[in-house]
Amino acid sequence: MIQDDRDCVSGSPEVRILERIDLRSGRTGRGNTDGPTTTAVVLDVETTGLDPDRDVVIELAMRRIRYDGDGVIVEIGRCRTWREDPGFPLPAEIIGLTGLTDRDLKDQRIDDDVVARVIATADLVIAHNCAFDRPMMEMRLPQLPSRRWACSCEQIDWRSAGFEGRALGYLAMQAGWYFDGHRAQHDVDAVVQLLRHEGTHGLPLLYELDDNAHSDSHLIETVGAPFAVKDDLRLRGYRWNPEGRVWWREVSDRELVSEQSWLAREVYAPDKGARGLGPRMTRRDAYSRYRRSRAA
């Protein structure tokens, strides 16, 4: 009877059925394995909070994938997950958010050597929030091999792909999937599933992410920007860095000229009252992008 009901509503425009994400390890049977392929590690961390100076990693999940030149995933590796005892009781909000308890973490430890070896096999490291995950990983494991990093949250044009928002659970839901969020392995699997989703260009979204990861970008910091334009900066996509006390945004090479024009007109024009002549700009690549110095 339940299956009959499902069949009745599956074709209805009034109902959307979501399927649980359930990745299977091994060859996918898709893509081109005769040509060159790229190996990536998709990772996610759960932590005791949001401050890299004070908070620590309590769960880490990693899954290797291999994809062809069109961004088609040809092989999915098994997911590795570790937990780590932080040495102090978990905050109540973290227990409520992740479902992890002090008992789950007692005497647990991340295997640093295995983590480093897995990352050493990859050409690219992918996380859905690199501005958070990368600094937390590098604080916890400063001996990590130097690799390119890519952010599936920021380096995919989700709106052009037909999505609203960038939160992982919401993106998955719009693509017809659901998962148990705020656990490292489930978040990793959700990222992999979304990277397989076809964009408007007819290729998986992983193709777009790989292309953007290999392109240089520019970190723009609006030094001396007047307080009166803070709302304009926020609407433009700038974020506040309380440590550096500056609004920042990262743009691609192709966006740089238009962004400079906008800043000259809306932030640094003579009548705006800026305390500086212009923004500070730093060129970034996939090795330097999302490091601690730019996290906000």
Image (spheres, helix red, strand yellow):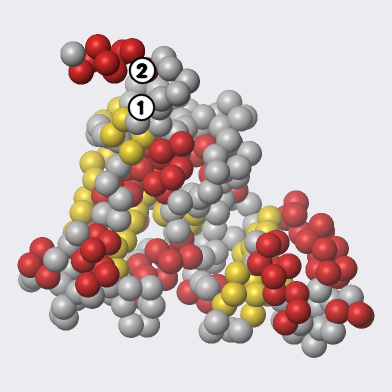
Counting from the top left corner in percent of width and height, residue 83 is at 18, 63
CA separation in Å, label 1 and label 2: 8 Å
Is the C-beta separation of discs 1 and 2 under 8 Å? yes
Query: Residue visible at 38% across and 78% down?
Result: 51
Q: How many discs appear?
A: 2
- The residue singled out by tag 1 in the image is 17
Q: Foreground residue, 19 or 40? A: 19
Horizontal side, residue 18 vs residue 31: left or right: left
- Mark 1 residue crowding within 10 angstroms, few (<14) / some (14–19) / many (20+): few
Horizontal side, residue 213 vs residue 14: left or right: right
Q: Quadrant of the N terminus?
A: top left
Q: Foreground residue, 75 or 165? A: 165
Query: Residue visible at 52% across and 37% down?
Result: 205
Quadrant in the rendering for residue 54: bottom left
Kind of residue indicated by mark 2: Val
Quadrant in the rendering for residue 21: top left
- The label on residue 27 is none
Q: Nearer the viewer, mark 1 or mark 2?
A: 2
Instruction: State the SS at label 1.
Output: loop
Kind of residue indicated by mark 1: Ile
The answer to whether residue 241 is seen in the rendering is: yes
Q: Is residue 187 above or below residue 177?
A: below
- The residue singled out by tag 2 in the image is 9
Horizontal side, residue 128 vs residue 160: left or right: left
